[in-house]
Image: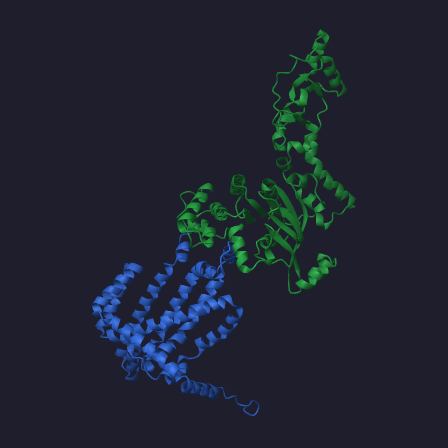
Chain colours: A blue, B green
Amino acid sequence: MSDVLPRVPVGEWFDSLVTWCTDNLGWLFDGIGSVIESTVEGLTDVLTFLPPLALTVVLAVLALFLRGWKLGLFTLLGFGLIESMELWEPAMDSLALVIVSAVVSVAISIPVGIAAARNEAVSRVVRPVLDLMQTMPAFVYLIPAIFFFSIGVVPGVVATVIFSLPPGVRLTELGIRGVDPEMVEAGEAFGTPPNRILTRIQIPLAMPSIMAGVNQLIMLSLSMVVIAGMVGAGGLGGEVLEGINRVDVAKGFEGGLAVVVLAIFLDRITGALGDRTQMSRATAGKS
Amino acid sequence: MSILRAESVTKLFGRKAAEAQRRLGAGADLEEVRALGVMPAVVDATFEVEQGEIFVVMGLSGSGKSTLIRMLNGLLEATSGTVLIDGQDVAKLSPKALRALRQNKVSMVFQHFALFPHRSVLANAAYGLEVRGVPKEEREGKAREFLRLVGLEGWEDRLPGQLSGGMQQRVGLARALAAGTDIILMDEAFSALDPLIRREVQDLLLDLQGRFGKTIVFITHDLNEAMRIGDRIAVMREGRIVQIGTAEEILTDPANDYVAQFVADVDRTRVLTARSVMEKPLVTVPANTGPRTALRTMREHQTSAAFVVGRDRRLVGKVTAEVIADAVADGVQTLDGLLDPGDLDPVAADTPVAELFARCAESDLPVPVADADGTLLGVIPRVTLLAALGAINTHVDEVLDEGAGAPEPALVKEGTGE
C-alpha cells in the first residue's frame, strides 16, 4: 500500500507545530495558564468559604427560587449526599473548573456563532473546525494541552473549553439564522442601525436557542471532568480515576454519582434561566 | 408636487440581470428575459403618489407588487430607474441617510404584522420613535395615544402573542402612525385577516387617513379591497403596471382585456356612483312656464311626469300628467300649486349605485341626482341603471367574440381564490 501512496506525515507536522508553539509562544501560554489557574483557585476558595451544609442550603434556595420546590429538595438531598460521601472538596474543585470553563466557552462561542450567522464565509470556515473539535477524541488534544500548560487544572480547563465550544457556536448560529426575516426587515424598515438589529431584535429572538446552546455546553463541560482528572486537574475526576486505578468500585461509583448530582443541578438551573428570557416568556404566553 | 415618484423602476432577479436589462432596453420581451434565467419582478413601473392619497397597487401573487413596494423605501435596490421621495433619490442615499429617511419619512405595515414578540404592545407601538432616539416618556405617551386611536386602550402591557390577528395588525398600524412619517407603505397589510375583521380595519384605516392625511401606498391582491380604500389604483401584471386610475375609471374604462376580465366579477354596484351612471335630464319643465308647456314636454317624451326646475337648474319639484291635464282643462296659467307634494329626495352624486336599486324600483320617474345646493345634475332612469351594471360584461363578451371563439390565455384569470 505504501508503494502506491507516499506516506503523508500529518502527525509529524502537527508535532512540529506543537513544538514550535511551545518554543515560541511559551510566554503567551504561561500568561493564559496563570490567569486560568488563579481564577479557578479563587472560585474554589469562594465555594469552600461557607461550610458545606450552609452552601447546600444557599444552592437549594436558589433552585427553589429559579425552578421550584422539587429541584430545591433535590439540591438539598444531592449536595447533602456529596458531603456525606466526603466528596465535598473535590466536588467544589470540579464545580469551579466547570464554571470557569463554561464562562470562557460562552465568551468565545456566542460571538463566533453570531459572526458565523451574519457572514457566510465565516460559517463555512467555522463548521469543519467545529466538526473536528467535536469528533476528535478528547485525549488527543489533552496531550498538546499538557505541553503548553503542563499538568494541573489549566490543561483541564483548556481541553474542556475546546470540547464544549461546538454546541454553543452551533446553536447560536442556528438561533440567529432562525429569526424570522420579517422581523429583521421590520427593523430595517424603521431605520434601525445594523448593530441594534443584532442586539435588540436578533439576539433576544434567538435567546431560547442560545440558552439551549449554553446548557449543552455546560453538560459537555461536566462530561469532561473525569478526563480532566487524568491531567491532574483533581476534583471528582481524580476520585473516579483513583477508583479505576485501584479497581475500587465503591470509590468510583461515589465519584461518578457526585458528578451526576452536579450535572442535574446545573442542567435544571440553566434550563430555568433559559425559560426566563423575554422570548421564551413571549412564546409561552401564546395560547 | 407629488411626494413619491417612481420613474421606470425595474427589478430583475438573477445572475444575468445586467444583460437582461440591456436586452429589455433594446426592446426584448419578458419571455426572452426569462430564458436568460432572470426573473423580471418589476418592469418599467412609473407612477406618482400625491400627498394625502391612498394609492393602491393591485395584482395577483407573483405580479411584482411586493418587490415594488420594497424598492420605495430601499429595502430592495432597483436594477434601474429611480424612486424619488420628497425629491430625494432613494438609490443615491448613503446607508445612514437611508435609515434617516425610513425613520422620518416612510414607515411600513407588514402582511404578517412583524411585531416584535419579545416586546410589549406599547414598546412595539413606540418602536419607530425609539429608533429615532425620542425619550422614553415622550415616545410612550405618543404610542399610548395611537394605541387608543386604533382601539387598543388597556392592551399596552400585553405581548403581541396574546392578541388576535386583527388586534396585532392594529398594533402594526399604530406603530407606523406613531412613527410620525408622512408616507406609510402597507404590504398586503390586511390580507392575512378574515373578511369581517378586514372590513373593520379597512374602515379604521380610512378613518385614520382622513384624520391625519397620511400618504399611503397600499399593496393588495384583493380587487374589492383596492376599490374600497384606493383613491387611485395601479393594476400590475407580470411586473408591469397595466393601468392607473380611480376605481371607477378602471371599472368603466379598463385599459385592456386583462383588466376587464379582472374587474368582471367586482361588485360594481358598490364602486360605481350615481355620477357615473346618471344621464342628462330630458323631461324638465322650467318653474315659470305654464301647464300647457309642461304637458307638451311630457307628451314629446311620452312620460307621465316631469321634474320642475327653477332658475340655476335648482330642483323645485315634479308634476304628473293627470294633474297638469286637469289644470289645462281648467285654464290654469301657472304651475304654482300643481307640484306633486310627494317627496323628491334627490340623491348625491357620490351615492353608490347599490343604494339606488330600491329607489329606482319604487318610482315611475327617474331618480334625480342633485348637488348639495339642490341643483339638478342628472337623472337615473331604471333602464340606465341596469345597463350600467351590464356594461363591462358586454365589453368582455365583445372582446371574446372578436378573438374568434377560443379565449386567449391572457383572459383566463389566474388564481382568483387566493
Location of the N terminus of chain B (image quadrant): top right
Q: Nearer the viewer, residue A178 or B9?
A: B9
Q: Residue at x 73, y 57 (%)?
A: B29
Is there any visible trace of residue B304 in the rendered image? yes
Q: Nearer the viewer, residue B200 or B76?
A: B76
Q: Position of residue B96 (x, y in %)?
A: 53, 59
Residue A235 located left or right of residue A164: left
Q: Choose top left, top right, bottom left or bottom right for residue B153.
A: top left
Q: Is residue A65 above or below residue A101?
A: above
Q: Nearer the viewer, residue B71 or B165?
A: B71
Residue A36 located left or right of residue A110: left
Residue positioned most to the top: B330
Q: Is residue B62 above or below residue B231?
A: below
Q: Position of residue B393 (x, y in %)?
A: 70, 39
Q: Is residue B78 above or below residue B152?
A: below
Q: Choose top left, top right, bottom left or bottom right for residue B358.
A: top right
Q: Is residue B5 above or below residue A274?
A: above
Residue B167 located left or right of residue B274: left
Is there any visible trace of residue B188 in the rendered image? no
Q: Position of residue B364 (x, y in %)?
A: 67, 22
Q: Position of residue B237 (x, y in %)?
A: 67, 50
